[in-house]
Amino acid sequence: MQPEGHSQLSVTNTHHTRILADAFHEIDKVCRFISKKHTHHVAFAKAFSNTMFITDKTDQLRMEGYLLKNNMSSFDRMRIEKPDWLWKRVRHYIPNKDTLFELLNELFKLWGHIKCTITGQTLFSNDTWKKSQGVLHDVRMGWLSDPIGIPLYTIRFTDKHGLPVYHCIRGTNSVEGAVHNPIRRNFAALNASVELADSAVADFRHRHNLDVGTLHKTGREYLGHYDPWLEHEISEKCADIPWAKPPFTSVPLWLCYLRYQPPRTQ
């Protein structure tokens, strides 16, 4: 059973506070208890992912038209050959909890009893069945479905083929992989004082915000420096010159954040 692909839901102004689970972790919760030697392990993992994520209909039609026009592989073939390239240009959605529960419950029942062609063992063990029920519990609670009315995708840029390249905020990979893990690696053997740790985190935050902010706003890699005091000095000197056309600086000549006084503490 597979529902028809749909497009991004409209934005609303009121949203209820809720818990969201990471889709990758939910899939891994089940797959980690499946033997890697089972002949159907990889196929099940793909089926699990394809069942949870519904392809955006508009993006798929656009992509199929592009592939057909350029005599390239079919959409299904590109999912295998170039998945990273494809899914940056085609959005996914996780359906509402009732639909998702029905889909995943049927998926587990169909795949769980399949036997390995070599060992004869079933795909799901007792522990796997318990984990699958845990996933269904999270689905029933509404922790996996996309929030209604909150856009999870923004267009980063349009590539040379005229296809939009999206940025997705679903999941925790961007936080764990780009922020938490680097900080933990940097502090692993540092044994830093509170003052040094605060300075190191501030420096990391400043560099990360410049890199990520530039990439998301312009679609290009940040190639500048990370010295705000140098930028401030350049801006100050430029402000003393009567320019017919002011030069470009990352800090506007009429605004500099280093001029602000720190907040007072009680």
Image (spheres, rainbow, N blue to C red):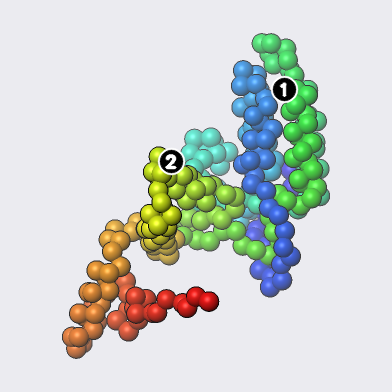
Residue 261 is left or right of residue 110, and the answer is left
The amino acid type of the residue labelled 2 equals Ala
Residue 11 is left or right of residue 103, and the answer is left
The residue pinned by badge 1 equals 123
The residue at the point 27 percent across, 61 percent down is 225
The residue at the point 18 percent across, 85 percent down is 241
The residue at the point 61 percent across, 27 percent down is 42
The answer, for residue 121, to whether it is visible in the render is yes
The residue pinned by badge 2 equals 188
Q: CA distance from mark 2 to mark 1?
A: 39 Å
Name the spot of residue 81 as percent of width and height, x first.
49, 35
Q: Secondary structure at mark 1?
A: loop
Q: Quadrant of the N terminus?
A: top right
The answer, for residue 4, to whether it is visible in the render is no
The amino acid type of the residue labelled 1 equals Leu
Q: Are marks 2 and 1 in contact (CB under 8 Å)?
A: no
Crowding at mark 2 (Cα within 10 Å: few <14, some 14-19, many 20+):
few
Name the residue nearer the viewer: 213 or 148: 213
Disc number placed over residue 4 in the picture, else none? none
Name the spot of residue 181 as percent of width and height, x first.
47, 44
Q: Quadrant of residue 150?
A: bottom right
Q: Quick check: 3 above or below 164?
A: above
Q: Secondary structure at mark 2?
A: loop
Name the residue nearer the viewer: 231 or 154: 231
Q: Nearer the viewer, mark 2 or mark 1?
A: 2
Q: Quick check: 13 above or below 197?
A: below
